[in-house]
Amino acid sequence: MVDSSPKYIFVTGGVTSSLGKGIISASLAKLLQARGLSVTIQKLDPYINIDPGTLNPYEHGECYVTEDGAETDLDLGHYERFLNVPTSQANNVTTGRIYLSVINKERRGDYLGKTVQIIPHITDEIKYRIKLLGKSKKYDVVITEIGGTVGDIESLPYIEAVRQLRYDLGYQNTLVIHLTLVPYLAASGELKTKPTQHSVKILLENGVQPDILVLRTEHQLPNDVRKKVALFCNVTVDAVIESIDVPTIYDVPMKMKEEGLDVITMKKLALESDLEPDLIAWEAFLKKHKNPKKEIQLALVGKYVELPDAYKSISEAFIHSGAANETKVSVKMIHSEKLEQENIEEVLQGVHGILVAPGFGHRGIEGKIMAVKYARENNIPFLGICLGMQCAVIEFARNVLELQDAHSTEMHRNTPFPVIDIMEQQKGVTDMGGTMRLGAYDCILSPESNAFQTYGTSNISERHRHRYEFNNDYLEKYKNAGMVPSGINPDTNLVEIMEISNHPWFVGVQFHPEYKSTVLNPHPIFRGFVKAMVEYKERQK
């Protein structure tokens, strides 16, 4: 690109939520990246929480953690999985963060006695955050996804900021993509465009004309429907893009390539690239994913299993690692709280691996511990993540070390055997938001461990999100009984990984490996776990 300043693309949504703005944004970014352009994506969330760190997963799905320790929206996980490039604090901005910054400036006297208002102060802060990402690193394109739906009260300042930015930066340097729904009425056999027209009308009332329309649909859009939308929404016909339902989210970039979304985007922004999109590796992944040679069943034991988005990164990591092993991983969601009242042998019969998921709080904890015990005693491949690793430590203490009342001080403050205890740095912390041990930390692996064999190196870095840790006062007892620390933080001696040495594959990790798994780089821990499950299934024949 000749111009030294980045081009800015804004992705808005209308008609209904959950249409997939994040996937469309990530797919377009992937196509532009595949043409040799440097691209990043950010998410603007209209809720007043500073970040999703204190939100219940039932409210907002999983909380995704970046390398620099930001607790962010789960869409950032999609961005990283598609682009294979880390995101940061600057890639997720909430209304809460915007208002907090403006209020802090007012308290310091930065506004010199001015009356602080939505316009210009809030909108200026939004514009600053959008442009800040473009200045933080050399990018050709910055894509900004605006959360919520056009017409929502909480989204209005963001739409106004987009209107102003188009004026500030120039219309040749900015682009608005609007994602809407074209519903199908079975009774009349018709695709209805009126919701899209009304959605665009709301944008126009706020001074923003979309340049490209992406229409979510369950049925193919005939040319006459595209022409009608183009005519009544003031866009060219080639800027009406069909986004039909596809088998997986990873098909969307290929579908958008067929529709020419990248071509029309580059044309309208005067972006130049002589390269056709290089999607060879992506296509190879899709081929393996859709044509597995083997199939295994995994039991995922957690307490938010009713909402798949609560474990989104874990689910996607199994898709990546499954393709790498040419294996379909069928995931059986098991509610840990209900497991406490059920016959565990009946529930877990036939599974080839057990994953105990991360989480917080005492609810369902005994069910997780029961699942750990079943995996350990039956030599079933096991992976525990964060709290799942801590449950493995508690189970081993109770049933192998014979410390009957062993527990975590998170669940039982006065336990006589606190094998999991609050971190020293966390003892004086009172605020809940953004105060955990967050982000990437180093870890040194033992050469004889499953972890070392899986990673192929002794030095790794992984992302964390926790307050409690393994209590090193009990370390020798564990070592002597066969549960060994195979990963240690070199600066704090924090135990990062625990393994059982005489078990085929029993690994608990304090960190969250799912955050770093991408389409083109499946995470080693998940690859190794899937491989262990395949081998376990073979041994059962």
Image (cartoon, rainbow, N blue to C red):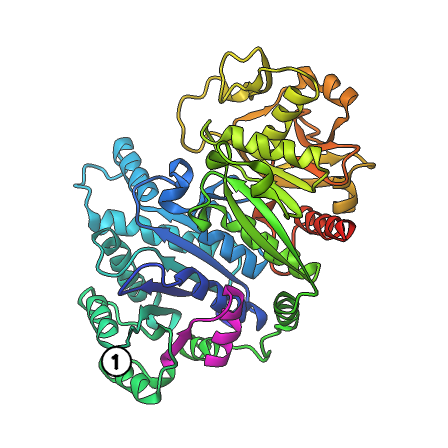
Residue 403, percent from left and from top: 64, 15
Drawn side of residue 521 relative to residue 123, left or right? right
Drawn side of residue 72 relative to residue 35, left or right? left
Going by the numbered disc 1, the residue's amino acid type is Asn
Q: Is residue 140 visible?
A: no
The count of marks equals 1
Does the stretch in magenta take in 452? no
Comparing 22 with 173, the one in front is 22
Q: Is residue 248 above or below residue 479?
A: below
Drawn side of residue 107 relative to residue 539, left or right? left
Q: Which residue is at the far right?
A: 448
Q: Which residue is mark 1?
A: 234
Comparing 510 with 146, the one in front is 510
Residue 442, percent from left and from top: 67, 36
Q: Which residue is at the far bottom?
A: 224
Q: Which residues are magenta?
A: 239-259
SS at circle 1 = loop
Q: Is residue 202 above or below residue 397?
A: below
Residue located at (22% from left, 37% from top):
112
Q: Residues within 10 Å of mark 1 (few under 14, many from 20)?
A: few
Residue 439, percent from left and from top: 55, 38
Q: Is residue 282 above or below residue 22?
A: below
Residue located at (40% from left, 54% from top):
43
Image quadrant of residue 214?
bottom left
Residue 426, percent from left and from top: 50, 22
Drawn side of residue 440 relative to residue 196, left or right? right
Q: Is residue 143 visible?
A: yes
Residue located at (25% from left, 47% from top):
121
Residue located at (21% from left, 67% from top):
207
